[in-house]
Image (cartoon, rainbow, N blue to C red):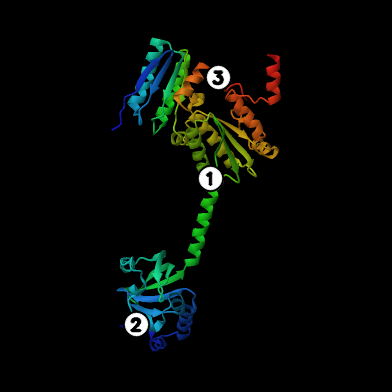
């Protein structure tokens, strides 16, 4: 049985959320509520969603992430998905779950860099 | 045994009406390149044609009356009983690939077809086997698979050219299997080297079709999901034309005509700049 606890930590002006390996629907729903609650409470600049432990990504999880990211934007924050595994990325692409433009980063470190210097990628076209 | 005299005794054949056509059929069997032999339901060989003599090395005299298990390798004792069991139920065994042992001890690869023989009342009284030597074919097939795997391995390298930059030069046509392997290698390398930029170079791709383009887009999307940025380089005029004609939208993808130009973009993303020694000297003077 996998540990279904999600951990949500506020570090300075960023929220860091770590997902368990195989999140069920209840956990995924809790994610959204907790994130939005914390956004209201701490008013952070950004949210880093660490999914490096996640082994399977279903459409519900993907949709919730995309939605939550949009909601966070509306509340004045920026979401970065960090640490997606190659196998998860391949499956997600094949299922068409492309996270609708949410920022992504290889590691939590990079995600924090991205939040510190926003939109470095948009310069190049 | 009635069946025995019918199949192996020529005297019995002549008693039957339509001798001409019977003899004709018998000569077809006899002259076939494939081994064709009949056996009883307990596996005793009843007839043995010239093809069988050639493939197995045993003459008809040596084999008729012997159990078929003589031909079976020691490690497959259950194979013939299983086949005969199926034949007893009226089933046919088609294109069954297995190995048999020749008289000289050599193990050969064969493709077997076994079907039931029925008497006039429709009762199953034996089995006829057609065997084709597929040793050469099998060797060729194995060599081909081996070669295909080799090509797959050598043609999709992913190289780190700078801290944070990997290059995946793509060569040849991109079928689904290669595309999948290419994607896996690229993504693994990105994670392994913690690279923020991946250059996908298509200089070595002769032509791009819709499917290839789809694979490229999937790869680029996966790279993005991982948290890195993909840059498509080596977009020659012909490739650009095809992509535009196919109506493929690469608006969200950074593309460049050469690998060098792509590398420049990559360095720019990483906030790096190439300074010539001359520039450096000038900078030092002006200080």
| Residue at 44% from the left image edge and 24% from the top image edge | A108
Toward the viewer: B188 or B174? B188
Q: Are marks 3 and 1 on the same chain?
A: no
**Looking at the image, residue B165 lies above or below residue A110:** below
What subunit carries mark 3? A
Q: What is the secondary structure assignment of the residue under circle 1? A: helix
Quarter of the view holding residue A51 = top left
Q: What is the secondary structure assignment of the residue under circle 3? A: loop
- Label 1, on which residue? B178
Tell me the quarter of the image containing the C terminus of chain A: top right
**Looking at the image, residue B83 lies above or below residue B13:** above
Q: CA distance from mark 1 to mark 2?
A: 56 Å
- Label 2, on which residue? B4
Task: Locate residue A125 relative to residue A55 in the image: left or right.
Answer: right
The answer to the question of whether label 3 and label 1 lie on touching residues, with beta carbons closer than 8 A, is no
Q: CA distance from mark 3 to mark 1?
A: 34 Å
Quarter of the view holding residue B119 = bottom left
Q: Are marks 2 and 3 on the same chain?
A: no
């Amino acid at each position: 049985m996998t540990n279904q606890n999600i951990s949500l930590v506020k570090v300075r002006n960023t929220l860091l959320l770590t997902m368990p390996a195989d999140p069920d629907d209840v956990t995924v729903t809790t994610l959204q509520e907790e994130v939005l609650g914390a956004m209201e409470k701490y008013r952070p600049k950004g949210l880093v969603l660490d999914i490096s432990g996640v082994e399977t990504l279903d459409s519900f999880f993907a949709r919730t992430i995309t939605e939550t990211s949009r909601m966070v934007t509306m509340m004045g924050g920026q979401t970065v998905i960090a640490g997606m595994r190659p196998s998860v990325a391949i499956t997600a692409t094949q299922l068409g779950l492309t996270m609708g433009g949410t920022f992504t980063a290889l590691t939590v470190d990079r995600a924090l860099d991205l939040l510190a210097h926003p939109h470095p990628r948009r310069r190049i076209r | 045994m009635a069946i025995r005299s019918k199949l192996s005794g020529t005297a019995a054949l002549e008693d039957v009406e339509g001798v001409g056509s019977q003899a004709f059929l018998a000569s077809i069997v006899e002259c076939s390149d494939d081994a064709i032999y009949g056996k009883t339901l307990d596996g005793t060989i009843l007839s043995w044609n010239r093809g069988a003599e050639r493939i197995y090395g045993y003459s008809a005299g040596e084999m008729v009356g012997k159990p078929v298990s003589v031909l079976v390798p020691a490690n497959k004792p259950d194979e013939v009983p299983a086949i005969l069991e199926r034949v007893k139920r009226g089933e046919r065994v088609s294109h069954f690939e297995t190995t048999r042992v020749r008289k000289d001890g050599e193990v050969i690869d064969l493709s077997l077809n076994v079907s039931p023989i029925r008497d006039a009342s429709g009762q199953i009284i034996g089995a006829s086997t057609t065997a084709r030597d597929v040793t050469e074919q099998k060797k060729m097939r194995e060599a081909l698979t081996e070669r295909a795997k080799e090509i797959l391995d050598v043609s999709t390298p992913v190289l780190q050219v700078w801290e944070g930059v990997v290059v995946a030069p793509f060569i040849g046509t991109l079928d689904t299997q290669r595309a999948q392997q290419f994607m896996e290698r690229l993504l693994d390398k990105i994670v392994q080297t913690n690279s923020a930029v991946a250059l996908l170079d298509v200089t070595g791709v002769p032509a791009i079709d819709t499917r290839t383009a789809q694979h490229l887009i999937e790869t680029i999307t996966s790279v993005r999901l991982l948290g890195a940025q993909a840059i498509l380089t080596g977009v020659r005029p012909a490739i650009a034309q095809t992509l535009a004609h196919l109506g493929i939208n690469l608006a969200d993808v950074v593309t460049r005509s050469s690998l060098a130009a792509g590398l420049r973009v990559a360095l720019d993303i990483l906030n790096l700049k190439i300074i010539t020694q001359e520039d450096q000297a000038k900078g030092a003077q002006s200080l």
